[in-house]
Image (cartoon, rainbow, N blue to C red):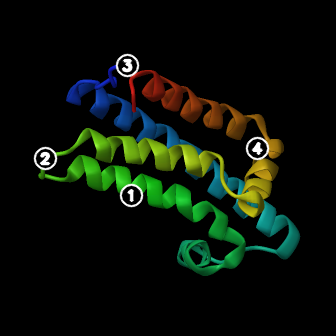
């Protein structure tokens, strides 16, 4: 029977911080890319408030919401004053892996975004690198 790896709380927090940054940058690039696509095919979006409303309510943007949820979940974990368990951290890394390998419909939209430009591919790779490190650490 092999022992389960348990990284230190400091290492876990470092990896979660890196994951947070990487997903945040990826999410920002995805939002910008989707906005450009929308405007190219459907015309200009009004101001920032209208665009935010669309991000929150427009079905065409729904596939990006799991990225937003992941960012918020990591924030809440890191900001919590309650003791944190390694299982909670593992769950966050599991959610991140699922977000990067989404169901068919979402995957096709994500793949389309990945094919639009190298920036998103590089940002995706940065998230994968953190996830691979976390997996090596038992997260």
- Label 1 near label 2: C-beta < 8 Å? no
**Badge 4: few (under 14), some or many (20 or more) residues near its Cα, within 10 Å?**
some
Residue on which the image places disc 3:
2
Going by the picture, which residue comes out furthest to the front?
A: 1
Q: Residue at x 13, y 47 (%)?
A: 83
- Label 2 near label 3: C-beta < 8 Å? no
Which numbered mark, 4 or 3, is in the foreground of this view? 3
Separation of disc 4 and disc 1 at Cα?
23 Å
Q: Residue at x 63, y 30 (%)?
A: 125
Task: Report the front residue among 78 and 102.
Answer: 102
Residue on which the image places disc 2:
83
Which numbered mark, 4 or 2, is in the foreground of this view? 2
Going by the picture, which residue comes out furthest to the right?
A: 41
Looking at the rendered structure, the secondary structure element under dot 3 is: loop
Q: Position of residue 12 (x, y in %)?
A: 30, 31
Q: Residue at x 76, y 34 (%)?
A: 118
- Label 1 near label 4: C-beta < 8 Å? no
Which numbered mark, 3 or 1, is in the foreground of this view? 3
Residue on which the image places disc 1:
72
């Amino acid at each position: 029977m092999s022992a389960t790896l348990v990284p230190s709380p400091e290492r876990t927090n470092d990896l979660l911080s890196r994951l947070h940054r990487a997903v945040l940058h990826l999410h920002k690039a995805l939002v910008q890319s989707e906005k450009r696509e929308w405007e190219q095919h459907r015309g200009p979006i009004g101001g920032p408030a209208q665009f935010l409303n669309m991000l929150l309510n427009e079905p065409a943007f729904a596939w990006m919401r799991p990225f937003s949820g992941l960012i918020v979940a990591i924030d809440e974990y890191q900001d919590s004053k309650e003791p944190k368990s390694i299982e909670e951290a593992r769950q966050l890394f599991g959610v991140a892996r699922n977000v990067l390998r989404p169901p068919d419909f979402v995957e096709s939209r994500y793949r389309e975004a990945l094919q639009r430009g190298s920036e998103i591919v590089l940002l995706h790779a940065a998230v994968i690198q953190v996830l691979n490190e976390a997996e090596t650490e038992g997260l």
